[in-house]
Image (cartoon, grey):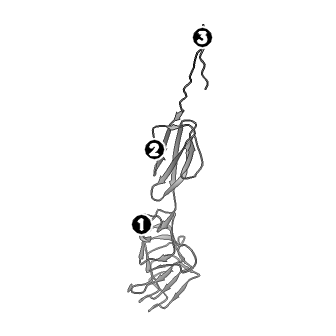
């Protein structure tokens, strides 16, 4: 804005000096449930023409849905030019894709955290884990990358439904048990699905299905070098 000064009764020479101050503005950043926001640099006010960075950090199992207030979008972190006072909010939603080891250090930790409808995505590597999926509904356990790039020791599924295990190399060497055990799981409409897996080197069965269990589907998979049966179905298993 402009300012003026009126001189009256000018009778001689005058020296006039104008002093200017930089305008400053504020940032108010808030987070919804399941996350936090941080402003950098953290100051009470910011000079006009500078920029501020606002970073959203979701809680585990959540992701940034978008920014609100006087800005929009999903960029994170968000760079904000300061030419007015800013009020910024972050909204978070459930992230149904849980990643190992980026978010969870072990596959079992991700399984234990998982909610119905979640997918646990596992990056390439060898994981010395015998996994347990118990009393869960609607979970996908997926090996990322190309075939045979994620190795685990075994999987036990109990009292669960709508479970998919895809892309794993299950090497049961030294475990003294089955590569896969399915117990009392699945219904007529909620199958247990094993897709593109390898099951090998078990001192017992490759896959043991103990009933009563619903449909267990084995798709595009290889089962070999197991001491007893490749697939063993016992007591009213479909």
Report crowding for label 3: few under 14, some 14 to 19, many 20 or more residues within 10 A (C-alpha). few
Residue 182 in view (yes/no): no
Q: Is residue 138 above or below residue 74?
A: below
Out of 137 and 127, give the one closest to the viewer. Answer: 127
Q: Considering the numbered disc 3 on the image, is that residue within a helix, a strand or a loop?
A: loop
Residue 79 position in % (x across, y down): 56, 47
Report crowding for label 2: few under 14, some 14 to 19, many 20 or more residues within 10 A (C-alpha). few
Q: Is residue 23 above or below residue 224?
A: above
Report crowding for label 1: few under 14, some 14 to 19, many 20 or more residues within 10 A (C-alpha). few
What residue sits 49% from the left and 76% below the top? Answer: 125
Determine which quarter of the picture holds residue 104.
bottom left
What residue sits 56% from the left and 44% below the top? Answer: 80
Out of 234 and 17, give the one closest to the viewer. Answer: 17
Q: Considering the numbered disc 2 on the image, is that residue within a helix, a strand or a loop?
A: loop
- Dot 3 or dot 1: first in sequence order is 3
Residue 132 position in % (x across, y down): 41, 73
Q: Mark 2 points at which residue?
A: 42
Q: Do the residues labelled 3 and 1 touch (CB within 8 Å)?
A: no
Q: Which mark is residue 12?
A: 3
Residue 85 in view (yes/no): yes
- Dot 2 or dot 1: first in sequence order is 2
Q: Quadrant of the N terminus?
A: top right
Out of 107 and 133, give the one closest to the viewer. Answer: 107
Determine which quarter of the picture holds residue 113.
bottom left
Q: Name the residue under label 1.
A: 112
**Marks 3/2: CA–CA distance:** 51 Å
Q: Considering the numbered disc 1 on the image, is that residue within a helix, a strand or a loop?
A: helix
């Amino acid at each position: 804005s402009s300012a003026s000064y009126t001189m009256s009764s000018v009778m001689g020479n005058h020296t006039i000096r104008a002093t200017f101050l930089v305008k400053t503005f504020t940032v108010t950043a808030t987070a919804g449930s399941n996350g936090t926001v941080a402003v950098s640099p953290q100051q009470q006010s910011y000079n006009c023409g500078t920029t501020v960075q606002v970073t959203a950090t979701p809680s585990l199992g959540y992701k940034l849905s978008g920014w609100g207030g006087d800005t929009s979008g999903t960029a994170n972190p968000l760079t904000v030019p300061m030419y007015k006072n800013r009020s910024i909010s972050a909204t978070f939603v459930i992230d149904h894709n849980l990643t190992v080891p980026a978010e969870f250090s072990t596959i079992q930790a991700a399984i234990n955290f998982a909610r119905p409808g979640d997918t646990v995505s596992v990056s390439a590597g060898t994981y010395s884990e015998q996994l347990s999926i118990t009393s869960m509904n609607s979970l996908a356990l997926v090996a990322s990358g190309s075939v045979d790039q994620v190795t685990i020791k075994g999987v036990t599924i109990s009292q669960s439904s709508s479970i998919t295990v895809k892309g794993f190399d299950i090497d049961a060497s030294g475990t003294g048990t089955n590569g896969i055990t399915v117990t009392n799981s699945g219904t007529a409409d909620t199958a247990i699905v094993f897709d593109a897996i390898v099951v090998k080197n078990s001192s017992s069965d490759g896959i043991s299905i103990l009933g009563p269990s619903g449909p267990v589907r084995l798709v595009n998979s290889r089962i070999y070098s197991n001491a007893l049966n490749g697939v063993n179905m016992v007591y009213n298993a479909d």
